[in-house]
Amino acid sequence: MGPIPLVDLSMQHAVLRPALDRAIADTLDRGDFVLGQALGEFETSFATACGAAHCIGVGTGTDALALGLAAGGVGPGDRVITPANTFIATILGILRTGAQPVLVDCDPQTALMDLAAAERASDPQTKAIVPVHLYGQMVDPEALVALADRHCLMIFEDAAQAHLAQRGGRVAGTVGRAAAFSFYPGKNLGAIGDAGAVLTDDPAIAERVRKFRNYGAPRKYFHEELGTNSRLDTLQAAVLNVKLPYLSQWNQERSTLAAAYDQRLADLADWGIQPIVNRAGAGHVYHLYVVRVLPHCRLDRDRLLAALQQANIFAGIHYPIPCHLQPALASLGYGAGAFPVTEQLAGEILSLPMFPGLTIAQLDYVVDTITQAVRPQSAIA
Ligand SMILES: Cc1ncc(COP(=O)(O)O)c(C=O)c1O
């Protein structure tokens, strides 16, 4: 069996290559490289696909967080609740507004933000909550909205890993006042470089993000706000326009692969391999398929990762060092032990290969390799 990477975009790009080439050539011919036609088209299509009124394309998912939160009125003096168990960009986005990130622990089963902990962390200075729909699974929208209503918090979703995810009849990015998406190449919908977007139904937030991304200018050479330069590149939008029509089908394929993993890995529960629990059912879009390597497993996570690598299987860890223990975030003042579940998961989690185009033969090889590593020989029939 040849190498099995964590993510392989080559098949997707091979199939779409003629359409991608045409889209790029069209943009070159038009020459509208900044805020061009393809960007407008993508913003309209992505907003429609998610069921939102506005999509504003920006340079990265991190910029979408920073500019979207600022457009929603988050700034210095505000506290913003978010999970410790996320990619650092969530917290960097909050910090860029001047607000104080307030971290909370996560649920050990789903790895998603612990909403009871979020509730306890809320106080009168808390302006917003940034739930992260981690690995493609949405945070429970009903419980989230109830919590936000009780404490008058703005919900700003980090949907960077959850394009078209659903839960409880809601679509990721449409639960709160606004949301951030990333189109980093490996995401469920990925560009061929960096790209991001803010999604919102609120026309005032939409207008403000449009200004912020364009030097704070509502029209050329008139600068109303202290903005920045962060436009989703027109060439990247042209690529995203080609890929967007396939997103649902790719998500469906991820879901089918996840069900195949679930079924095959069920036999390994007693041996300490436990998939992260899916409470979103068919709405989970499996940006990542993550298992926990529990303390009673024969191998610890790092040794299992090495055994997979030996077999040419490239698993990942999302994420090996919790945000609150990163040197760059030491000033937030959280030490080791602050978020025990997040810290425990960081030592146990393993992301298995997951991408549209992964074959069942490859998936079987991954599961067989894990089985051989974790099951004592005497237990193998
Ligand atoms: C949960 C989460 N938030 C934010 C981001 C930031 O997105 P970007 O890399 O496009 O800045 C990412 C992806 O990298 C992410 O996974």
Image (tube, grey):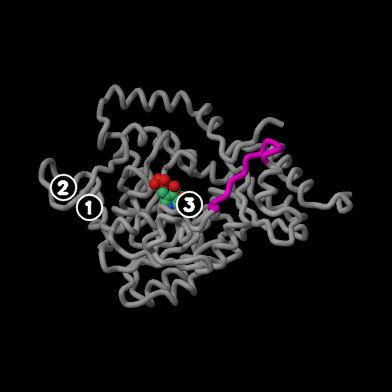
* Residue at the image point whose x is 64% and y is 45% from the top: 257
Residue 254 visible within the image: yes
Q: Residues within 10 Å of mark 3 (few under 14, many from 20)?
A: many
The CA distance from mark 1 to mark 2 is: 8 Å
Classify mark 3: helix, strand or loop.
loop
Residue where numbered disc 3 is placed: 162
Q: Does mark 1 have its CB less than 8 Å from ligand 1?
A: no
The residue that appears at 63% across and 49% down in the rendered structure is 258
Q: Amino acid at mark 1?
A: Glu
Q: Are marks 1 and 2 in contact (CB under 8 Å)?
A: yes
Residue 182 visible within the image: no
The crowding category of the residue bearing disc 2, from other C-alpha atoms within 10 Å (few below 14, some 14 to 19, many at least 20), is some
Q: Which secondary structure lies at badge 1?
A: helix
- Tell me: residue 237, above or below residue 160: above
Residue that label 1 marks:
207
- Residue 44: which quarter of the image? top left
Rendering quarter of residue 1? top right
Q: Are marks 3 and 1 in contact (CB under 8 Å)?
A: no
Q: CA distance from mark 3 to mark 1?
A: 24 Å
Does 204 sit above or below residue 44?
Answer: below
Q: Residue 372 versus residue 246: which sits nearer the camera? A: 372
Task: Say which mark, if any, is on residue 41.
Answer: none
The residue at the point 38 percent across, 45 percent down is 46
Q: Earlier in the sequence, mark 2 or mark 3?
A: 3
> What label does residue 218 carry, if any?
2
What segment carries the magenta color? 309-320
Q: Residue furthest left?
A: 222
Q: Amino acid at mark 3?
A: Ala
- What secondary structure is the stretch in magenta mostly built from? loop
Tell whether 133 sits left or right of 27.
Answer: right
User: Is residue 317 covered in magenta?
Assistant: yes
What secondary structure is marked by label 2? loop
